[in-house]
């Protein structure tokens, strides 16, 4: 069993969305296909992935370093101990050859996207949905049938009224979501508080609403927002400032009793461990949101989860960033707190399979082998082009 080819392409998101810190008008993503020599139905089995959303395509690093390393590797260097199956952890080690310590974001996204595509291929070869394969390897064989899923919305849109915002959130509740997330930090504090109060009238209680500042605030601004938001008892206050400002997180955690959330912009186990050591976060209430395809992939993400478990963090505290089929399979397979969803937001790259069913905030997991991109017709058309 071996990898015969790895192909990638950059695709624009074509999004007009804006959060408090930036817009997505120039955003691109890398789509990857890992092709194997295993044949099914007359075709070679191929695994697919893309590098989530919020970071740009990274094909240059893939083409110059990581794809050549995998294709040059001796076949046995990529196989598990049985010698019969491809091992994504071995592939990760091969891609990391001759890489200096530190500087993780420069390579973690390129490596992680290829690694997740390899997992898709491995699960297809095994004839299993990825969440079942991950449950066998990383969660004691506890296979879930559904996964909790919250919805991200409340973006800043030109001309948006409070009524528009409330109507958007009602639509999410009508679709079956029971927890919502909205943006803050794009307007003055008093106006943002009014937006939060308007959404709370729709959702009914603070624990059903989270807010996301997208790293916008200074220390003083975050403390002011924390003071204003604390009485609402929100599900969490996400990324108030730079993800590496651990001292600021510790100060805010000491002053803000409700849950905080962060981690989607941390790309290594070492960085997440520093957050746990120095960020003042509270394992019994706060939330970690690492994005696996952007953080070296699933094998390394499982190591991050294991590291945090030793520090007292329960699996339910993890909500991987992404809002896509990859994060859904990973959250379900590893038995985490849940996944996020961005329906109709990131074009072909947002949301889940066309036949996905959501009831009471839980998404029924697919039976398709692998990640299940084949059930997401618009996205799968993009991925199939790498084979055709």
Image: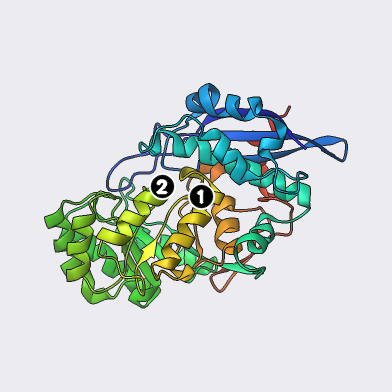
Name the colour scheme: rainbow
Q: Is residue 348 above or below residue 219?
A: above
Q: Is residue 243 above or below residue 11?
A: below
- x then y, percent, for residue 201: 33, 74
For mark 2, what is the residue? Answer: 268
- x then y, percent, for residue 189: 17, 59
- x then y, percent, for residue 258: 28, 73
Q: Is residue 76 above or below residue 80?
A: above
For mark 1, what is the residue? Answer: 300
Decide if residue 212 is on the left or right side of residue 148. left
Residue at horizontal 40 percent and vertical 73 percent from the top: 208
> How far separated are the C-alphas under marks 2 and 1?
8 Å
Residue 228 occupies quadrant: bottom left
Quadrant occupied by the N terminus: top right
Instruction: Point out the residue furthest to the right here.
Output: 42
Residues at marks 2 and 1 touching, judged by CB atoms closer than 8 Å: yes
């Amino acid at each position: 069993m071996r990898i015969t080819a790895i192909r990638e392409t950059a695709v624009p998101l074509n999004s007009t969305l804006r959060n408090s810190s930036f817009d997505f008008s120039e955003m691109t993503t890398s789509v990857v296909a890992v092709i194997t020599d295993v044949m099914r139905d007359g075709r070679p089995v191929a695994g697919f992935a893309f590098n989530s959303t919020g970071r740009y395509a990274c094909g240059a690093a893939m083409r110059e370093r990581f794809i050549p390393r995998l294709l040059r590797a001796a076949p046995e260097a990529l196989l598990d101990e049985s010698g019969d199956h491809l091992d994504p952890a071995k592939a990760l080690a091969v891609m990391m050859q001759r890489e200096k310590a530190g500087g993780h974001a420069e390579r973690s996204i390129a490596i992680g996207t290829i690694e997740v595509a390899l997992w898709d291929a491995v699960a297809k070869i095994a004839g299993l949905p990825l969440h079942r394969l991950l449950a066998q390897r990383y969660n004691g064989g506890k296979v879930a049938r559904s996964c909790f899923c919250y919805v991200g919305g409340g973006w800043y849109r030109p001309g948006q009224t409070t009524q528009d915002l409330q109507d958007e959130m009602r639509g999410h509740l009508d679709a079956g979501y029971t927890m919502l997330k909205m943006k803050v930090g794009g307007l003055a504090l008093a106006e943002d508080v009014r937006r939060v109060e308007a959404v709370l009238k729709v959702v009914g209680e603070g624990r059903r609403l989270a807010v996301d500042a997208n790293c916008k605030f200074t220390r003083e601004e975050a403390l002011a927002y924390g003071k204003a938001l604390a009485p609402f008892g929100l599900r969490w206050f996400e990324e108030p400032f730079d993800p590496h400002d651990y001292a600021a997180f510790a100060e805010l955690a000491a002053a803000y009793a409700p849950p905080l959330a962060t981690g989607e912009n941390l790309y290594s186990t070492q960085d997440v461990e520093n957050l746990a050591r120095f960020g003042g976060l509270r394992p019994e209430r706060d939330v970690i949101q690492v994005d696996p395809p952007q953080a070296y992939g699933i094998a390394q993400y499982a190591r991050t989860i294991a590291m945090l478990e030793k520090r007292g963090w329960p699996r339910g505290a993890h909500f991987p960033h992404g809002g896509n089929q990859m994060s859904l399979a990973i959250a379900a397979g590893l038995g985490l707190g849940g996944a996020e969803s961005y329906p109709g937001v990131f074009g072909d790259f947002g949301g889940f399979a066309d036949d996905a069913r959501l009831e009471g905030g839980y998404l029924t997991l697919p039976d398709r082998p692998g990640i299940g991109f084949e059930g997401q017709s618009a996205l799968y058309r993009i991925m199939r082009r790498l084979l055709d």
